[in-house]
Structures are given as structure tokens and as C-alpha cells.
Image (tube, rainbow, N blue to C red):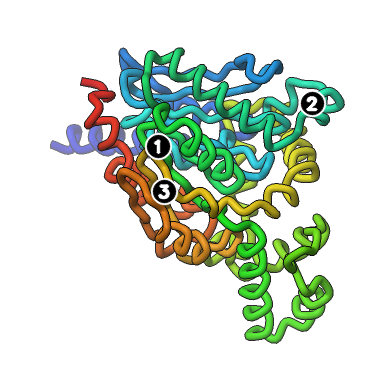
Amino acid sequence: MFERSSRLCAALLAGLSITTLAHGAGPDSRAAAVKIIADMRRIVTPQGIEQTRAVRIGGIDQWISVRGTDRRNPVLLFLHGGPGYVAMPTSWYFQRGWEEYFTVVQWDQRGAGKTYAANDPAKVAPTMTRAQMLADAEEMVAFLRKEFGKDRIFVLGHSWGSSLGIQLAQRHPDWLHAYVGIGQITDGMESERRGWQYTMDAAKREGNRQAIRELASIAPYAAPGKPLVLKDLYLQRKWLARYGGAVYGRTGSDAESAAAKLAPEYTDADLKTMWDGTEFSSSRMLTDVLTQDFSVYTKFDCPIVIFNGRHDYNVSASATAEWFDKVKAPAKQLVWFEDSAHEIFNEEPGKTLVSLVKYARPFAEKAGDVAP
């Protein structure tokens, strides 16, 4: 009996030692951490797809990642925000569940992320226009429809990407199962004014004299007929983020930005130029897009689904809800996220997945565009 107990004790101690070593050892480099993430989310199903590659769009190489457990599922194209604020490098955190119901395509747009790194910025700079970006989006959707043999796909537009998405829905409803908007841009200048007012009110409640002084220095902000100056916009965004208008309950998006460092799709070189791409795109296009009024688009021939963060002041959630009331479409759904601001898929990833499956995927199911 004693001998048996001793052997059992030794076995337990050996197991404990192995476990302790395993738990004590951690990744000692970015490469090691990235490998752990890549291995955990690897697609291993027979019909699965896992690719990161360049495709020729708009005359230049533009990078996409394509991930899904069954390529027979409906395709969902994610149009990132910014301009230039790529979602591919943080998708490892929020996207894995989506891939069981959709074939998800992350696209680094012209002038952003891996696409920025793959092309000469001096040659791309003259092409950084809203018209060219929309043409790129149209070409990308056409490519994906052909590549996967799909009559229709889903387009999800976030923030800046929602300005492209809403125009795709307007111009090509027959290409889409549905359009999904997150942080949906409507009347850009009205959204800016509401964001400034929210931030000023928060600063006054806190008694933050510096914030009050700086915000007052750009008043009247986004006034009708007044050009929107980039430095004023950045100042407004600095304090808006401080008061949770971009990421609810936080003072900025540092956590989301840091997550990009663990992106399996991104090399060290990609990471070094990622924020250069954001600045390259935003400096050329941000003020222009925010002076547009996309609320004029109210009649659609495809379903419209909007995910709206209750605390979003980066793109005004209240302005989006007012626009949505006027929307006419074959089907429409407004989904409120009570614990989110502008980064819904990062802030409430579980509810985002459930909402995509509940409110978007049924349009594909009705069309028979799902894996058997």
C-alpha cells in the first residue's frame, strides 16, 4: 500500500512539475506570441479556407485575408474605418466566431496597412479620393463574387468604411444579401457638432479646465459653411476619447491599437508602417468625408442592418438612429449595443457575433447560400 501511494505521489509531483513549467514559460518574443495565436485559430476543417494574399484592385496590389471554416458559407467583406484604420491586425481577437458562419474577408484598403506597405506612397497619393475608393470597393465585391461563385455577399462597413458600404448598397443592391453598418456615418458635420457638445459637457462636469479651454478654442466647431480643419478634428477626438466617446468606459483605444502587435497576418515590417498608412490616408481624406451628408441615402433595394453603440460620439449614434427612422428597405433592423461606443466588435464581441447570425445570416439562408 505504501509503495503504491509513493508511486502515486511521485506521479502527481511529476505532473505538477510539468504543469508548472508549462505555465511558467511564456512567449519571449512577438514571433512566439503570434505563433500561439495563429495555432489556436488555425482553420483545420476540410472545407475551410485561410489565406492572406494580394489581389490586383484598382491597378495596384491590395491585401486581403480570407478566413472561414466552410467556404460554402456566405462571404462577408469587412470595410475598415479610418480612413486607414485597418481591422485585419486586430481581427484575431474579435473575428474567430464569425468564421463558423461566414467566409470573412478583411481588406487593407488603398493607402492602408499591408496595402500601404506594398505600394509606392508617392504614386498612390494622387489616387486617394472618395471616388477611387468606392471604385476599389466595387471591384473588390465583384472579385469576391466571382472568386467564390456567389451571386450575393454581405458587406459590413465600419465608420469610414460605412460611407463606402452605404453607397455600395445604394448602387448595387443585387450584389448584396444585406448591408451591415457599424458606426454608420450619416450627416458628417452634424455628427461632429454633437460629438463636440458631448465632450464639452463632459469636461464641464469634471471641471477639466484644460479640456474646456482647448475645446472652446475651436468653437464654433464644424459650423455650417466652415471648413473642417484636421488639427481641430484631432483636438476634438483627443478629448472625446478621454470621455469614452470612442471606446465606452475607457479613455482611448490604446488596448485595441496594442492588439495589432499580435497580428499573425502582419510582419514586423508591416507593423512599422501601419500607423504611417493611417496618417497617409487620414490626412488626405478624413476631413473631406466628414463634410459629406450621407443621410440623403434613405431608399434601398437590399436589407439594411445597423449596429449602433449607445455611447458612440465618434460617429453620433443619435444621428444614425434619426436617419434610420427614415430608411426604406425590403427589410431593416437597428440593433443597440448598450455597453459600446464606436468599436462595437471589440467592445461587445459576443453580441456582435450573435447579432450577425441572428439579423444578417438569415438573408443568406433564405437564398440557400450556406454550407449544407
The x, y position of residue 36, in whole percent, is 50, 30
- The residue that disc 1 covers is 19
The x, y position of residue 26, in whole percent, is 55, 37
Task: Name which of mark 3 and mark 1 comes first in the sequence.
Answer: 1
Q: Marks 3 and 2: in contact by CB < 8 Å?
A: no
Q: Residue furthest right?
A: 122
User: How many C-alpha atoms fall within 10 Å of the one at disc 1: few (<14), some, or many (≥20)?
Assistant: few
The number of discs equals 3
Residue in view at x 39 percent, y 45 percent: 304
Q: Amino acid at mark 1?
A: Thr
User: How many C-alpha atoms fall within 10 Å of the one at disc 3: few (<14), some, or many (≥20)?
Assistant: some
The x, y position of residue 188, in whole percent, is 63, 57
State the CA–CA distance, disc 3 to disc 1: 31 Å
- The residue that disc 2 covers is 124
- Closer to the eye: label 2 or 3: 2
Is 188 situated above or below 221?
above
User: How many C-alpha atoms fall within 10 Å of the one at disc 2: few (<14), some, or many (≥20)?
Assistant: few
Q: Is residue 209 visible?
A: yes
SS at badge 1: helix
State the quadrant of the C terminus.
Answer: top left
- Closer to the eye: label 3 or 1: 3
Q: Along the line of sight, which residue is nearer the eye, 329 or 161?
A: 329
Residue in view at x 54 percent, y 44 percent: 162
Is 201 situated above or below 230?
below
In the drawing, does residue 128 fall left or right of residue 36?
right
- The residue that disc 3 covers is 349
Q: Amino acid at mark 2?
A: Val
